[in-house]
């Protein structure tokens, strides 16, 4: 059974399909129809990339909610998760002049101390784990899933180096093209074939990564897969 986040992502992809139907070229294309086709192709890239980004944030929130509900000891969480969770309050305290650090340190100990104690439990804030991610590039996705003990999520979701390379390329091209469009690159565009490739890549990646994350969370809690 997939996560709720994956179900929402799959449903949201229908919007990209709706734009595809509007993008179909007429039998006798005109300058206006070609301009519309190009604009719709750019819109599909932005929309598809946004749905991938939303999925990553949603599944992260769902994962944290799952862990919070099981009240596992902070020391049982991966060190990478604990470090990222404590990073911002620690940096805030370090950036404060010495004589004004007392309230910052008190907050740090109160909110983060359970993560560094053997048997203490507490509540994770899901936003802390993804505040660094500006876009779901392949490198950023590898970094995120590594928090949960998955060394290379692209290698983990396929046994074939060829398929791994195809997924990496598809996701990477999509995000790069979306960023170019968002930053005003008027030359950035995508054909129907390009977007079909991107769609296939993100569908495959998200569905398989979803399953791997569910299993990783089950391992952390010494129970069945989270979903």
Image (cartoon, rainbow, N blue to C red):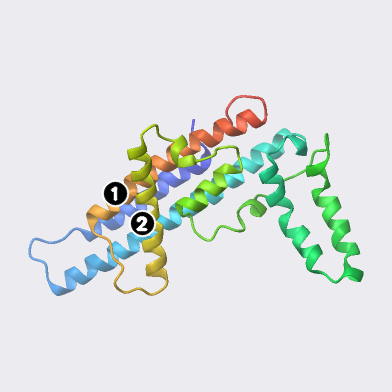
Foreground pick, 56 / 3: 56
* Rendered location of residue 183, percent (x, y): 42, 72
Within 10 Å of disc 1 (Cα), the crowding (few <14, some 14-19, many 20+) is some
Q: Which residue is mark 2?
A: 173
Taking the view exactly as shown, the residue that stands out farthest to the left is 28
Residue 118 spot, x, y in % from top left: 83, 35
Q: Nearer the viewer, residue 210 or 180?
A: 180
Front position among marks 1 and 2: 2
Do the residues under discs 1 and 2 have CB atoms within 8 angstroms? yes
Q: Give the quadrant of residue 166.
A: top left
Residue 101 visible in the picture = yes
Residue in the picture at 81% in, 51% down? 111
- Mark 1 vs 2, N-terminal side: 2
Residue 88 is left or right of residue 9, and the answer is right
Who's the residue at 23% across and 53% down the image? Answer: 193
Under circle 1, the secondary element is helix
Of residues 86 and 181, the one nearer the viewer is 86
| Residue under numbered circle 1 | 197
Number of numbered discs on residues: 2
């Amino acid at each position: 059974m997939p996560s709720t986040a994956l179900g929402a992502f799959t449903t949201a992809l229908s919007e990209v399909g709706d734009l595809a139907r509007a993008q179909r070229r007429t039998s006798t294309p005109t300058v206006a129809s070609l301009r519309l086709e190009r604009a719709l192709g750019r819109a599909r890239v932005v929309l598809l990339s946004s749905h991938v980004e939303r999925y990553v944030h949603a599944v992260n929130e769902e994962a944290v909610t799952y862990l919070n509900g099981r009240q596992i000891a902070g020391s049982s969480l991966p060190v990478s998760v604990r470090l990222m969770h404590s990073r911002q309050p620690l940096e805030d305290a370090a950036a404060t002049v010495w004589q004004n650090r007392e309230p910052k340190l008190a907050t740090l100990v109160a909110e983060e101390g359970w993560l560094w104690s053997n048997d203490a439990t507490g509540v994770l804030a899901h936003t802390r784990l993804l505040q660094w991610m500006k876009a779901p590039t392949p490198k950023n996705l590898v970094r995120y899933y590594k928090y949960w003990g998955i060394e290379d999520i692209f290698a983990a979701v396929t046994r074939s180096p060829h398929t791994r390379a195809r997924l990496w390329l598809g996701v990477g091209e999509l995000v790069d093209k979306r960023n170019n469009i968002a930053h005003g690159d008027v030359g950035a565009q995508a054909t129907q074939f390009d977007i079909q490739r991107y769609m296939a890549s993100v569908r495959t990646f998200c569905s398989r990564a979803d399953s791997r994350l569910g299993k990783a969370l089950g391992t952390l809690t010494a129970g069945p897969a989270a979903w």
